[in-house]
Structures are given as C-alpha cells and as structure tokens.
Image (cartoon, coloured by chain):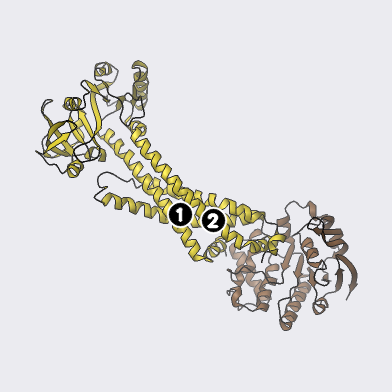
Amino acid sequence: MSDVLIEARDVRRSFDEGRVQALRGVDFRIHESEFVAIVGPSGSGKSSLLQILGALDEPSEGEVFFHGKSVAEIHDIARFRAENIGFVFQSFHLIPTLTAVENVQVPMFEMPWSPVERQRRATELLKSVGLSERMHHLPRKMSGGERQRVAVARSLANEPKLLLADEPTGNLDSANAQRIMELLQSVHQRRGMTLIVVTHDPNVANFADRMLRVLDGRVVSDART
Amino acid sequence: MVFLTIVYKNLLRRRTRSLLTIAGIAIGIGAVVALTSIAWGFQKSWERAYTARGTDLIVTKITSQSPLPVPFAEGIKTDLLKLPRVKEASGLLSDLVSIEDAPAMLIFGWELNSFLWQHLKLVKGRWPTNNTERVAVIGAIASDMLKKGVGSPVQIEAGELTVCGIFESSALVENGAVIVALPQLQRLTEHTGKVNFMNLKLDAATTDEQKGELQKMIKAKFSGYSAFKSGEMAQNNTAIQVAKAMSWATSIIALVVGAVGVTNTVLMSVFERLHEIGILLAIGWRRRRIVKMILYESMVLSFIGGLAGIAIGFVSVKLMQATPFMHGKIEGEISLNLFLLALLIALGLGMFGGLYPAYRGSRMPPSAALRYE
C-alpha cells in the first residue's frame, strides 16, 4: 500500500457553543492515489468533514495529518491549500466576471509563474476537460456541465496532491453528472492524485474505489467498492 | 491574465457606482487642486514681488498675527547701512486701505529714489517726481478695477490724490496695488516717520551663507526685528499663511467626503462579494492577496478620480481667472509639483478608503464566507 496522504484522528466539530455536533469523533486514513467517496444523508456531517480535510475549517477536537504532519501546525495554511488541495464545489463557484481561461488562472497567482505560463497552463487544462472551444466565454454563457468542467480545470491549476469535490454533480442533470464523474475519474487515473468526493448519490459513489459512510457525525462503515 | 485584470473587471461590475465614486473623488481632488493652486499662486506672486524689487534682505518687526507688520521708525536705516555688505536700504510702508467703492486694496509708500521702482514698467503717464505732490501711480489691474486713468482723482482714506501714471509689474500683487511716495502714505495713514519694511540691497558678491550671518546679526543687534530673504518673507507673510491654511482646511473637508465615498463603495462591493472572497481563499489565495485586490480596487478608483479632479481643478482655476469678478485677484499656480501632489493625495485617499474594507474582506474565515450565498 502507498503512503498515507491524509489521516483524521478523533476529529470532532461542534457549532453554536457545542449545542450542534456535526462530527463526533471521526477516524480514518486515506492513502495516496486513492479515490474515496464520503456518503451520507444531508446533515450527516460529511460537508463539515470535507471542509476540515481541505483545511478550510479546523476541528474543535482531534487532529488531521497531511503526509504525517499535523495540519494544525502548518504555519501558512493558505499556501498549504494553494499547493496541495484542489476544490470542486456543488455550485461551481466560478468568478462571474472572468472568462473560463481566466477563472482557471485564479489559483495560479499563488505560484511563481509568469502571466504567459499561467495562460499556457490554463489553456492546456481547459483542453484536457474538453473546453478548447469555450475558453473565452463567461460562466453565464455556459451550461452547468461546462461550468463544472471549468471548475475541475481550476481545481487542477496548481497540480494539487488532493482533490476534494463536494457534491460535484448536485446541480447537474444525469447525463452531465455522468460526464463530470468520468472526467474526475480520468483525472484521478491520469494524474494519480488522491480524490475525495462527498455525495449522497449512490451513482456517484460507485465511481470510487472505497466508500466511507457517515451518519450522525460518525463513520459507520468503510468499505471497498 | 494579470492581477489588475481581476481588479478592473470587479470595478466594471457596477459601472454606475464606480463612476459615481470616481466623480466624488474628482470633485474632492478638483477642490484641492483649485484651492491649492490659488494659495500657491498667491505666495508665488508675493515672492515675485519681493524678488523683482531687487531686495536681498527684508527687515521687519513681526509682533502680531496681523497681515502687515507694525510700522517702526525709519531712523533704523542709518544703523542698517553701517552693517557689513549692506549697499542700500530703502524704507517701505504698506497698508490695506479702502479706496472708494473697491474692497481693501494694497497701497505702498516707496522712497522716490530707491531701487524698488526699477522693476516696474510705466505704461501711461509719469512717475511721481517729488515727495510733496499729491499723486499716485496705480497698477494696470488696479486701474481696471477702480476704473481710473491718468488724471483721475482717487480718494484714499481721508485724502485725495491724482493718478499720474499706470504701471505694470511682473507680480500680480503689485499690479493690483497703488504706489505713492513714502511721505504721502505716511501722511495719509498718520504714520509720519514710520515704515513697516526696510529693504536691503547687498553687495553682489554676497553668498547665501553671508546673508544668513547677516540675518543673525540683525536679529541680535536690533531687538524685536527680524531679517528675511525674499522667499522666506513670502512664507512668513500672515496673509499667505491664512490663505494656505484656509485652502488646506477646505481641502481636508473635501478629502474626508471623498474618502467616505470610497470606503462606502468598496465596503459595499466587499460585502456583496463575501462569498466570492471565501472561494478565493478556499482555492488558495492568501489573505494578503485579498487585501491587495481590495486596496487596488479602491486605488484604481481614486487614481482615475484623481486625474479627472486635477483636470477639473486646473480648468476651474482658469475659468475663475477669466471671470470679471476674480480677474486680477487670483493667479493660480499650475505646476508639475501640484499635479504630483494631487495624484499622491488621490492615491493616499484610495489607500485610506480601502483599508477598512480590505480588513473586513480578508478577516472572513473561508468556511464562513462560503456559506454566504
């Protein structure tokens, strides 16, 4: 088995001064190049878990380790996110004023790349997700499926080690959902990056190699698919 | 894509709001430019008057905040002439008087044979020839304002004089003034035997350092008196200081209004985009970059507003100079220094106006910002 990329140790997260407990002690290890689906009904705590794994939020208790190092001890967390983690969101979250090729370049500002290099990389990425014809379109001129492709290209901008997708097909019809999942799967296979998808859709979860089922803030099952 | 593309496109989201903010800044900066231009021009004009007269040092008794120094006995001249390097000394009495219907005007009493007259150009009539004749020469602008020509009688305080000549000077303050022989003004203002300035001409070879030594010597030797170089004199002129202070006070009000406008616009635009800022943080932007983006937005607004304001300021000074009411009374200084100062103020305004919005925008935790939709 390859090295452990990310590990959660007794991760707990409560809100509203402890009155709402989203996570009640979660433990797991995810290895490099794994494709894991985190499934569960809404309100089960899976999105809170994803935000903690993506270093967007901190656990109330417990620790997350990335390559064996505690995330809590990382000094420059923004740089850590920029260099290691790519996000794909349910609502795409593209910047509405920027074209597709510009949106893909946004995360690259944190990398030591020239404008020409940024443009070249963004063009390549959009080609790889099948959008070479839509480079200069604004998000509002694109279909949901196309927007999510741009978001996937953007998540790959800085060549992250870990890709986190939060209900990536939630706003898409079944045909587009199928295409986006195939795209994520091929990205995972070609680039060998670790992919964690949060979903409540069994069709999406079936693409993964492993499924963590979350219920009431706890992992209730962890199985290979 | 460069970073400024993002900034520029953000500002274009709400064009009307951005334009209104730019207009607000432009009006503020325009006011600053116009007022400063007039205040600086006023000072320049005095500097020119002092320099054109060929005066190296001006001795005066500054005892109060009055715009004109208090008169002192002209007998000091004999002692001043004994000082090293002093070639000539010439007493000058100046006052602000009401002349007929015109508002307060400057009137100068000069010694008839002094070097002070040499820079003036006679355009009509003649110069006064002796100390007893009751005549005055008036500047070209004063002639326009008073509607007086050669031979016209002119009522000054309680006395009446006849205009014997009209002159032009390189300094606006002199062009708008009346000049008479020193004893005549002493009589009219009841300051017999008194002057309020003593103009010294030094050896041509005198260095700046020697001038400085002489200034110290005068201050030490003649209690209550000070000696100024012509540039310093203009800076120490209370009227100029008041004009400058008023221009700054008005400018500061205009700038505060401008800064509040910028802050409001940028803050609104940040609040509208909290969700988007959350995304930028989530995809790896550092808080520093968020701060930079918001500050750039506010500085781009104020930079454009500043350029427009400079144009508005310079044009309004030109227009004011051309109106009959102001003509000859103001002389705006339009210089690269003022342009740069205004631009710097505009950028400072943008920086200041953007600070709080930038702070607010960048403090948001990404997970919380992502929840704003």
Mark 1 surroundings within 10 Å by alpha-carbon count, few (fewer than 14), some (14 through 19), many (20 or more): many
In space, the residues marked 2 and 1 are separated at their CA atoms by: 12 Å
Callout 2 crowding tier (Cα within 10 Å): few <14, some 14–19, many ≥20: some
User: Which mark is first along the chain, 1 or 2?
Assistant: 1
The residue that mark 2 highlights is B264
Residue A81 position in % (x across, y down):
73, 60
Image side of residue B271 versus residue B231, left or right: right
Determine if marks 2 and 1 fall on one subunit: yes
Q: Which residue is mark 1?
A: B25
Residue drawn where x is 71% and y is 60% of the image: B368
Relative to B220, residue A96 above or below? below
Q: Nearer the viewer, residue B290 or B177?
A: B177
Q: Secondary structure at mark 2?
A: helix
Chain at numbered mark 1: B
The tint of chain A in the picture is brown
> Can you tell which quarter of the image residue B176 is in?
top left
Above or below A190: residue A26: above
Residue found at x 60% / y 79%: A133
Residue B220: % across, % down: 37, 17
Side (left or right) of B35 relative to A57:
left
Residue occupying the point 35% across, 52% down: B314
Q: Amino acid at mark 2?
A: Asn
Q: What hue does chain B carry in this figure?
A: yellow
